[in-house]
Image (tube, coloured by chain):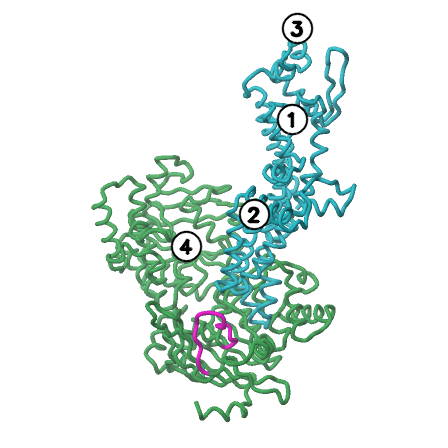
Chain colours: A cyan, B green
Amino acid sequence: MTVFLFRRLLSALAVLLALSILVYGLFYLMPGDPAELACGKRCDVSELAQVRHAMGLDRSIVAQFWTFISSLFVGHSYDTGVGTTWCSAPCLGFSFQSNEPVTQMLLDRLPVDLSLALGSAVLWLALGIGFGLFAALRPNGLRDRMTTLVAMTFSATPLFVLALLLLIVFCVWWQVLPFPTYVPLTQDPGQWFENLLLPWLAIALVTAGNYLRLTRAGVLESLGQDHIRTLRAYGYSERRVVLRHAVRGALPTLATMAAVDIGGVLAGAVFTESMFGLPGLGKLMVDSANNVDLPVVTGITLLAAFLIIAANAVADVLYAVLDPRVRLA
Amino acid sequence: MTQNTDTAAALGAPLRVEDLRVSFPGARGGELTALAGLGFELAQGQALGLVGESGSGKSAAALALLGLHRGTAARVDGRVLVRPRAAGAEVVDVNTADERALRSVRGRELAMIFQEPLTSLDPYRRVGDQIAAVRRMHFGESRKEAAQRAAEALEKVGIDAAGKYRAFPHEFSGGMRQRALIAMALVLEPRVLVADEPTTALDVTVQAQILDLLTELRRETGMSLILISHDLAVVGGTVDEVIVLKSGEQVERGPVRKVLTEPQHTYTQALLAAIPRLDAQLPEPKPADDAKPPLMRVRGLEVTFPAKRGAALTRAVAGVDLELREGESLGIVGESGSGKTTLGRSLVRLQQPTAGTIEFDGRPLGSWRGRELRRHRRDLQLIFQDPASSLNPRRGIGDSIAEPLRVQGEKDDARLEASVCGMLERVGLDPKLYHRYPHQLSGGQRQRAAIARALILRPRLVVCDEPVSALDVTTQAQVVALLRELRAEFELTLVFIAHDLAVVRQVSDRIAVMNAGRVVEILPAADLADAQDPYTRTLLAAVPELPHV
C-alpha cells in the first residue's frame, strides 16, 4: 500500500510539473507583451523597460521559469523601482489589475468553492445513490423508468437554465429563499446554509443523474454475480442483498467519480458562480481572462490543475481502500 | 398430483422432489425445457449423484432445489418438499413457499456449494466474516459466538482459522475457496448439502481432497449430499445412488456400482465409454528416429515474474531441459501453478524466457526479430483452453481462421475463403458455419474452429494448452480423436498440456510431469501407470477411478 501511494504521488508531481511548464507558456502564447499589460496604457518607454526588468522579462526563458517555480516554494522579491516587495511562498505574482498578491486572491475565493463543492456533493451523492438503489430494486419497473427519466431530464438541462428556474421558483414565486449572496460559514452558519442551498441544488440536480445511472448499473451488474447468488442461496433477503452487498460492488466506481467531480467543482464552478453571483474562483477566472490579468489566470489554472490532480490521486487511493483486490498492485 | 397431497405431511426424509420441471422462455414465444420431470427422495445421510453433460438440466435442477430460479424468467413446476429438522415444523414446498419460509430453508436445511469457488465468495469481505454473518443471520447469535462457530467450521474443512480468518477470498487458492464455501455450509449444520460441480474448476489432487472431505463430513455430521457433476468417475466414489440426466430427462437411475458396471441405457454406456482411462490400451508409438536432430531443444529454461507484495518473485519455470523430436507428441501434466502453461507459451515465443535457450530447427528462438519473427510464427502455433474467449466474439469464425493467413500476406479473398473452407471441413465443421459467431456454436465446435485457426498456416509445432478441459466428456473424446488424426495427417509435432492424466496419456508418446516449475520426470506414455516418482504417484492416486467393467 505504501509503495502504491508513493508511486501515485510521484506521478502526480510529474504531471504537475509538466502542467506548470504548459501554464507558464501562456505568458508567451498570449498576444501582446506582458510588461505592456502590467504597466497599463499610459506607460512610456523607460517605464516599460523598468517594468520589464522588474518582471524579469529581460532574462532567459529558462531563468524566468526557474524563478516562477522557485517562488512557488520559497517566495520571491520584486524590484518595483521604488523599493522591493516581498511575495511570500507560494508566490504566484501580483495581479496586473489590483496589484494584490495572486495567492491571497485565490485563498480569499477558495472557501466559496469549498462550500459549493462539499455541500453539493453531499446532495448529489444522496440523491444519486438513493434513487439509484430505488430504481435497482425493481429494474425496468415503473418506478425505475420514472426515476431514470427524471434524472436524465435534469442531467440534460443546462446548468444556467436550471439555476434560473430555481431562482424564479424559490426566490420570486414562493419567496422562501433569499437571492444567494455569499456569507462565510465562520460568520453565520445559518445564513451560509440558506444562501448556498440553491447553488447546491443546481449542481446536485445536474450531477446526480450520472450517479444514479452508475449506482443502478453497478447494483444490477453485481446482482448477476456468483457471490450474490451465494448470499441468496444462504437465505439473505433480497433487500439486504441489494442494499448491503450489491451496492458494495458499485462503491469503488462511485467514490472514484465523486472525488474527480468534487475536484472539478472546487477548481471553479463558472456557471453556478456567475448565475448565483458567488465570488468564487470561476468568477475570478472569467473576470481575469477578460482583463488579460495573466498572473491571476496562471495562478487559477495552476491551482485548478493541482486540485484536479489531487482529486484523481484521492480517487485512486479510495479505489484501493474500497477494493481489497487492488491493494496488491 | 393428487396422490401426493397426503405424502407431504408424512414426509420423513429431509428432502423429496416430485416431478420437478424447469423451462425457460425461448425464441418466438416457445419454451425451452431444461428439466422435464425429476423425482427422488433423499434419506437422511444418503448421497445422491446427478450426472449429465452440459444441457442435461442438472444445474437447473440444483438451482430449483433452493428456489433460486425465483425472480428470473424460468418457469418451475412440481414440488420440492423440505422437512425442517425442528420437531413439529411444517413441510416447506420450495416452489410455493413464501419468501420468509424459503429463506429459513435456504442454507439452514439445504446448503449449496457452487462450481465457481473463485467467484462465489464476496470479494470485498473477509472470509471468516462472511461465514460468521451467515451463522448470525440464521441463529441470531452474538458477533463473538458466530465468529467462534465460523472459526470452528474453517478448522473442520482444514483451513487454519487463526491465520486465515481475516484473509480476503483473493488471497486463497481455488481449493481453499471451495473449502471456505463448504465451511459456510457447515456452519449452518444443514441436513442436505447440494454440491453443484464442486471440483470441476480444481486440480485432480485438490479434487480428491475435496471429495474426501465431503465424504468425511457426511459421515461425521450425518447430512445428506447431492453431488452434481458431468463426471461419472467423480460421482462414482462419493455417492450411493446416481441419476443420469440427458436433455432434461432422467435416462437411468440406480445404485452407483450397478450403473457404472452394468449401464442399461445407451447414453450411460456412451458416457462411460468416452471417459479416458489410465489403463486403456495405447497404439504403438512411432519408433523415434534418433539419427535426426531434435526439432526443438530447450536448455535451462527459466521464466520468473516480478514479486508481489512481500513475497519472493515467482519462478514459474525454474530450469527446464527438454528435447522434442520431429513428429512426436509430448504431454505435459501438472497441477495449476506448476508452470506448464508458462512453459508452453515460451515454446511458441509468446513468453520471453528469463534465462536459458530454446532452439527450433537448430536456431535459437530468441534471435528472431520483426519480419523474420513473423515468418517463423507460421511454424509455431498455440491452441488455448477456452475457445469461447480466444476467438474474437465480434467476428465470424471464418474470418478468425483466415486472419493468420492475412497476417502472413495473403490478400486474395477467394483464395482465403477456399483455404478456410477446406480447413473447416478437415476439422469436421460444415463450411456453412463460416459466418457464424463463436457464441452461436457449441463448445466442441468452437474448439474445432480454434484448431482450424492454428492449423491453417500448416505449422510444424503446435502447443495445445488444456484444449479439452472446458468440454463435456463425449465432446472431449471427439476432439482428442480429431487431434490424433490431424497430427498424423499434418505431420505435426504436438505439445499437449493438461491436468487430466488420462487425456494426456491418450495423445502423447512421452509425458513430462511438472511440479513447481521443474520437470520431475519424463516417461513413455505407456509406462505412466508404473511411474516411480513420488509426485507422479500422488497425481495418479488422485485420479478418480471407475470400476472395471
For the N terminus of chain B, the image quarter is bottom left
In space, the residues marked 3 and 2 are separated at their CA atoms by 53 Å
Q: Secondary structure at mark 1?
A: helix
Magenta includes A141? no
Q: Earlier in the sequence, mark 2 or mark 1?
A: 2
- Give me the C-alpha separation between circle 3 and circle 1: 25 Å
How many marks on residues? 4
Name the amino acid, label 3: Ser
- Residue at (59%, 27%) from the top-left corner? A289
- Along the viewing direction, whichever of B408 and B323 lies nearer the viewer: B408
Marks 4/3: CA distance?
Answer: 75 Å
Provide the residue designation for mark 4: B389
Give the vertical position of A72 relative to A200 (above or below). above
Q: Residue A27: where, in percent of width, then height?
A: 59, 21
- Residue B538 visible somewhere in the drawing: no
Q: Kindly indicate whether the residues beneath marks 4 and 3 are on one polypeptide chain.
A: no
- Dot 4 falls on which chain? B
Q: Which residue: 36% across, 70% down?
A: B274
Per the image, the residue denoted by label 1 is A296
Query: In the drawing, what numbered circle is on residue A206?
Result: 2
Rate crowding at label 4 as few (under 14), some (14 to 19) or many (20 or more) other CA atoms within 10 Å. Answer: few
Q: Secondary structure at mark 3?
A: helix
Question: For mark 3, does the 10 Å Cα neighbourhood hold few (<14), some (14 to 19), or many (20 or more) residues?
Answer: few
Span shown in magenta: B65-78
Q: Amino acid at mark 2?
A: Val
Between circles 2 and 1, the one closer to the viewer is: 2
Tell me: residue B446, above or below residue B227: above
What amino acid type is highlighted by mark number 1? Val
Which marked residue is nearer to the observer: mark 4 or mark 1? 1
Q: Position of residue B301 (x, y in %)?
A: 48, 45
Query: In front: B488, or A17?
Result: A17
Mark 3 vs 1: CB contact within 8 A: no
